[in-house]
Structures are given as C-alpha cells and as structure tokens.
Image (spheres, rainbow, N blue to C red):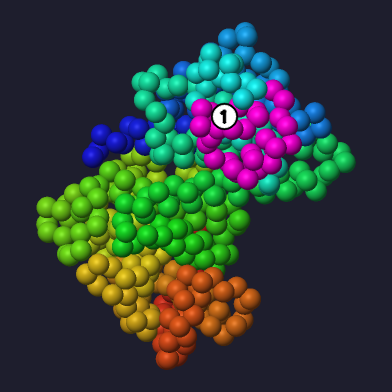
Amino acid sequence: MLEQSPKLIHAFGALAELGQEVANKNNFQETIRTSLHLLSGALGIMRGGVARYSRYGRELNMLAVRGLGDDFPLSLSVCIEDERQFLMNGLNAIDAHAARVLPFFQVYAASFDRRRIELFVPLIIRDEIVGGLFLGEKATGEPYSSYEKEIICAMGRHIGVAISQRNLLAEIERHSEENRRLFDDLRRTYADTVKAFATAIDCKDKYTEGHSVRVGKYTELIATELEWSPEQIEGAATAGYLHDVGKLTVERKIINAPYRINAKESAELNKHPTVGFEILQAIHHPFTDVPLAAKYHHERLDGRGYPDGLYDREIPYIAKVVNLADSFDAMTTDRPYKARRPAIDVVDDMRRNAGKQFAPELVVAFLRGVLRELKSETKDRRFRRLLGREYMEAEGLMPAISDALNELEPTSSLTYIATRSS
C-alpha cells in the first residue's frame, strides 16, 4: 500500500502550495494562473479554466485558461435559473454532459464538446457565487473518481477564497470589516479542508469514524488550556486532525480487524507514524510541527513508545499533546474488541500514567478543562458534545478529577513550553 504515498504527497503538496498562493496578495492574476496550473498538474488534467463571476452582469469572465484555444468564449452568460441551480449545488463538481437540462450547459454545449469540458465547479463562498472552474479530460482518458472530485472541490475552495479576497480588497476602503471577515474565512477554509482530509482518513476505519476529528478538537482544547497563541492553537489542532494520515497506506482489513491484531499485522500498522511523517514532511506545510506530531504521537515519556523509543525531552512537545488527545479518544471510544472505558477509569489511567506515557502538565491542563466545564465555570460545552452528556455526568467523576489534580499539580511544571507552529 506504500505505493499510494507519492499520490498522497502530490495531492497534499498541491493543496499546501495552493494555500500559499491564496495568501499571496501581490499579483492576483498570477495567483489564479498558478492555482490552475497546480490543480491541473496534481490530477493530470489536459485543459481547463478559472472564471470570476459578475453578479451585476450575470457573467462568468475567464481569468486564466489552459489548453482551451482561442475560440473558447471568454465571457459566459448565466441566467437566473442557472444561478439558482449553482447555489443549490454548492461547491460540488457538476458533470457537464449530464447537466444539459440547464440553460447554461445547453447554450455552450458546442464549446464544451469541442474542448471536451467534463466538469464544472461553481465556486461558492459564503453562499455567494464568486466564480467557476472548467475542467477538461484527464491525460489518462479515465473518468474522474469521487476521490479526485473531492480534491478538486478542496482546491476550488481555495481558488474561490482567492477570488473572493480580490473582490473584497477592491472595496477595502468602504468595507474594512469585510476584509477582516475575509481573513477569517481564509483561516476557516484551510481548517475545514484539513478536517475534510481527517474525515477521509477515518473512513477506512468503520469502528473509529470521527477519531481524527475528535483528536484535533481535543488537541485544540489542550492548547487552549495552555493559553497558547491563536496561531499555535490552530497549528496544534491541525496536527491532531492529520496525526493518522499514514493510516491511508495501511490495509483496510488490518485497520478494521474485529479482534486484537497479531504481531505481523501490528508491525504493519505501526509503520503509519513514519509514513505519515514522510507524507507531511514532503510538502511546505503552514505549521512546521505537524509532520513531527504525525511521526512521534505514539512515543512515551518512559521510552517504551514507537517508532524510535524516544524519552521525555527527546519527544517534540506537540507530539506529547497529540499523544494525550489520541489516547484519551481511544479510551473513550468503543472499539471492535473493547467497549469505551468508564469516565472515572479514564481519569485514573491518565493520573497513573502521568510521567510515564503522558506529560503531567498536559494531563493537568486537560483535566482542568473538563472540570471547569463540569462546574459550569465556562459556557463552553465542547467536552459534552464530544463525549455525550451522560458520560460527562457520571457519578463520582468530579471528585475523581479533583483528586487527580491535587496529586499531580504540585509535581507538574506550570511553565508550558509551547513550540511555535508557524
């Protein structure tokens, strides 16, 4: 399965480079041209184009083209019905042949057929059409797979944000607040894309569906309790979401085994941290510690972890955070061969393994967050949403957490070393 790694690296690399292109405000036209080139190169697409939508003229005006020829229309009219259907479709790929019932695809059928346009992706940002992607056939001649369409939509989301950013910057003097919202949208879009990949990772394992997303959220909660900066918190969450990316190369039958796997299968599964590191290290990632978290999230402070058997200070700090989040989710989630553990047992496990598997100050930060929510000292209810109200309100949980904190706090370092993630 390791032969999948180059394809994954290429897709992740193109996505990361595209994110950097979107952040480049110096030359919008060049950004769009480069974005189209990255998308085409990642999937081997022969021809295509990127258009910006004018709401006032109801036109899609081409910003960049590749291989479409001089006779392809540079401005394409969109009627009210087309606009309504595009908005209903959302940012999803439309089969240009199957959509001939729409006026837009009827009017330009000859142009699309001549240039073998197979997909059209409306670029929707904040429930507004900002542009469209026109994509021709692949070099292999094969139809687009659902996986490739997901990648196209993820990249299209970035391109859409770039176009939206350009539109808003043109009116920045009158819409300064919109500029701030644009920046927030860009960050949310990147985060949403990372979460989408996390969901794709978990799809291989029907028993732990949502694991990577939950680990990302737990990692974010720990970083928040440590009072890291917003950028560091975002980087920590990203590390949590992508920590198991290496499992994409592990055979599904091993991941989904309804029993404790044997030594050979375990050895195969235990390769996933190193494979994940190789996938993430090969790209220019916005958060430099993310590959390290993928590689070392199964290391332990006592040196009994894998893949390298590192001890305490040898382990990157972000990997310690992800390790705690990953272990907590494993203990509080049903597995094919083991039911989720009672909340009090989980707290006891964290207490006993503080200093052995987990960094004590991280256990303290995590349990403090849970206790504050149980005491309603915060309006946040994220632990309840992730674990369920009944689980969080287990009898004796609050005293158990308080006892653990009383034991751990005197010996825990209160100086948290936060590795910058940018």
The residue furthest right is 174
Q: Is residue 327 left or right of residue 402?
A: left
Indicate the position of residue 268 as horizontal and vertical percent values: 19, 49
* Residue 380 visible in image: yes
Q: Residue at position x 43%, y 52% from top?
A: 199
Magenta stretch contains residue 90: yes
Label total for image:
1
User: Please, is residue 229 above or below residue 171 in the view?
Assistant: below
Tag 1: residue type? Arg
Residue 167: image quadrant is top right
Q: Residue at position x 57%, y 29% from top?
A: 100
Where, quadrant-wise, is the N terminus in this rendering? top left
* Residue 167 visible in image: no
- Label 1 residue SS: loop
Quick one: 130 or 94, which is closer to the camera? 94
Q: Residue at position x 54%, y 40% from top?
A: 92
Residue 148: image quadrant is top left
Q: Is residue 295 left or right of residue 110?
A: left
Indicate the position of residue 51 as horizontal and vertical percent values: 65, 26
User: Please, is residue 297 above or below residue 248 in the view?
Assistant: below
Where, quadrant-wise, is the C terminus in this rendering? top right
Indicate the position of residue 380 as horizontal and vertical percent values: 60, 73
The residue furthest front is 101
Q: Residue at position x 38%, y 81% from top?
A: 343
The residue furthest top is 70
Q: Is residue 320 left or right of residue 371?
A: left
Q: Which residue position holds label 1? A: 100
Residue 257: image quadrant is bottom left
User: Please, is residue 225 above or below residue 256 in the view?
Assistant: below
Stretch in magenta: 76-105
User: Please, is residue 181 above or below residue 119 in the view?
Assistant: below
